[in-house]
């Protein structure tokens, strides 16, 4: 019986988080109130407190749930590719696919977080966003550095610049795809990625 109760509680927690991530991707994390979430998830506010304890803990749990989804949809396919340039190309392709399929209804959860919390230093959400963005940059730079060392890219490749160009392409595609609903922006991003990489091939 206790195991069943724990299972039921975990299922409720997971269902609430699924709703919370969806709402936060559309409406923003900081504006998501416990009352709004309780209404959308079909639970009481006291029930939410039982699972999260505070608004800050709710925010951190939402961010972690979004990380798990992003890792599954974008990072894991890249890690499964061959080392170096195939990984760099795959992570860009996976990101654009995840945008195109609207895994988060409001577009990339972390691009939205970046716009929402970039100037709010000193908050847990800001620190989480900064850490995640740094981790993303370092991952792409590691792929590009291996590609350069293996001769898949020029020895003179400016790895941070290449990664900046690729990140700019995919994140602008995300914003424009959400704003305008135009799938052609994804094709433009793919061409920009191909051009940036081609300019650095041996």
Image (spheres, rainbow, N blue to C red):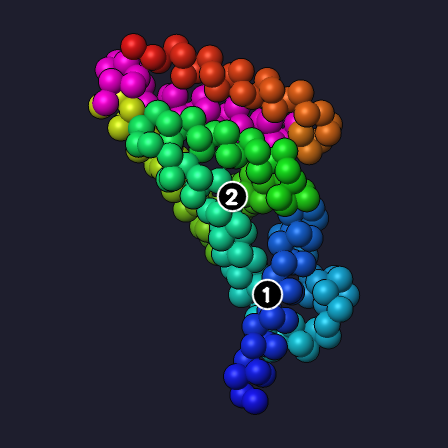
Q: Is residue 183 left or right of residue 151?
A: right
Residue 140 location, quadrant = top left
Q: Is residue 168 above or below residue 97?
A: above
Disc sitting over residue 73 in the figure: 2
Q: Magenta span: helix, strand or loop, mainly?
A: helix
| Dot 2 crowding, Cα within 10 Å, few <14, some 14–19, many 20+ | some
Does residue 175 belong to the magenta stretch?
A: yes
Relative image position of residue 77 (x, y in whole percent): 44, 39
Relative image position of residue 161 (x, y in whole percent): 38, 21
Q: Is residue 134 left or right of residue 189?
A: left
Does residue 173 belong to the magenta stretch?
A: yes
Q: Is residue 159 left or right of residue 67?
A: left
Disc sitting over residue 153 in the figure: none
Look at the numbered disc 2 and give the secondary structure of its residue: helix
State the residue at coordinates (22%, 23%). Answer: 149
Residue projecting furthest to the bottom: 1
Q: Which residues are magenta?
A: 150-176
Of residues 7 and 70, which is closer to you in this image?
A: 7
| Residue 10 visible in the current orientation | yes
State the residue at coordinates (60%, 70%). Answer: 11
- What residue would you read off at disc 1? 14
State the residue at coordinates (30%, 17%). Answer: 153
Of residues 164 and 200, which is closer to you in this image?
A: 200
Q: Is residue 191 above or below residue 180?
A: above
């Amino acid at each position: 019986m206790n195991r069943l109760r724990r299972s039921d509680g975990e299922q409720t927690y997971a269902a609430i988080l699924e709703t919370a991530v969806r709402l936060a991707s559309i409406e923003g994390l900081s504006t998501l109130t416990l009352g709004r979430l309780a209404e959308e998830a079909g639970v009481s506010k006291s029930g939410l407190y039982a699972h999260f304890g505070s608004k800050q803990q709710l925010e951190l749990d939402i961010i972690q749930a979004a990380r798990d989804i992003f890792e599954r949809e974008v990072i894991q396919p890249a890690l499964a590719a061959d080392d170096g340039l195939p990984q760099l190309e795959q992570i860009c392709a996976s990101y654009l696919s995840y945008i195109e399929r609207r895994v988060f209804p409001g577009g990339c959860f972390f691009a939205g977080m970046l716009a929402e919390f970039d100037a709010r230093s000193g908050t847990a959400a800001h620190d989480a966003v900064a850490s995640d963005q740094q981790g993303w940059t370092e991952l792409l730079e590691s792929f590009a550095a291996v590609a350069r060392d293996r001769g898949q890219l020029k020895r003179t490749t400016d790895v941070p610049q290449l990664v900046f160009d690729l990140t700019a392409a995919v994140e602008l595609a995300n914003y424009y795809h959400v704003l305008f609903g135009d799938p052609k922006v994804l094709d433009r991003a793919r061409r920009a990625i191909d051009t940036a990489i081609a300019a650095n091939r041996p």
